[in-house]
Amino acid sequence: LKVRRRRLLSFIKTPGNRRCVEKCLKFINKQAYIQTAIFGYSFCKASRMGFFLILRNVLRISAVSVVSQIVLFIGKVFITVASAVGGYYYLDIHS
């Protein structure tokens, strides 16, 4: 047991791994707080329920993520093109 604990601590001590573990814990905490607020579970039960909820819906979450990235990209392109065209017509009229 002590060897496992030492290995885990040495794994967490590296900056990249520490950041990864911290992000995972923040995500699990966020899900646990949401589950607690909705259903009134205790924190441990809520974190378990939130984790399995995410695990069950991993494909939906990834699909929503991909679609949102595409929509954001199209929005950025549209705003850039609209600004460029509007600026061109503004300069063309006023010069």
Image: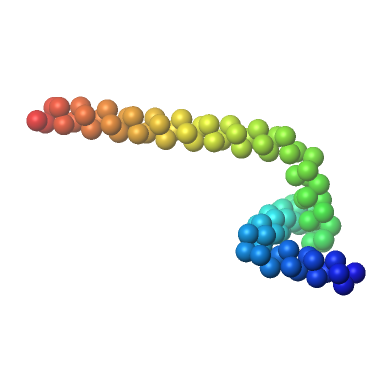
Residue 5 is situated, as x and y percent measured from the top left of the image, at 83, 69
In-image side of 11 versus 75 (left or right) = right
At horizontal 40% and vertical 31% (from top left) the residue drawn is: 77
- Which residue appears farthest toward the right when viewing the image? 1
Residue at 32% of width from left, 30% of height from top? Answer: 82
Q: What residue occupies the far bottom of the structure in this picture?
A: 2
Figure quadrant of the C terminus: top left
Q: Position of residue 24 (x, y in %)?
A: 70, 55
Q: Quadrant of the N terminus?
A: bottom right
> Does 71 sit left or right of 95 as displayed?
right
Which residue occupies the extreme left position in the image? 95
Residue 37 visible, this angle: no
Q: Give the colouring mode of the picture.
A: rainbow
Image coordinates of residue 55 in percent, x first then y, are 78, 43
In this figure, what is the number of numbered marks?
0
Q: Is residue 95 left or right of residue 3?
A: left
Q: Is residue 75 visible?
A: yes
Q: What residue is rendered at 23% in x and 32% in y?
A: 87
Place residue 58 in its image quadrant.
top right
At x 18%, y 31%, the residue is 90
Can you say whether 30 is above or below 95 in the image? below
x, y percent for residue 3:
86, 69
Query: Depth check: 44 or 25 in front?
Result: 25
- Give the quadrant of residue 27: bottom right
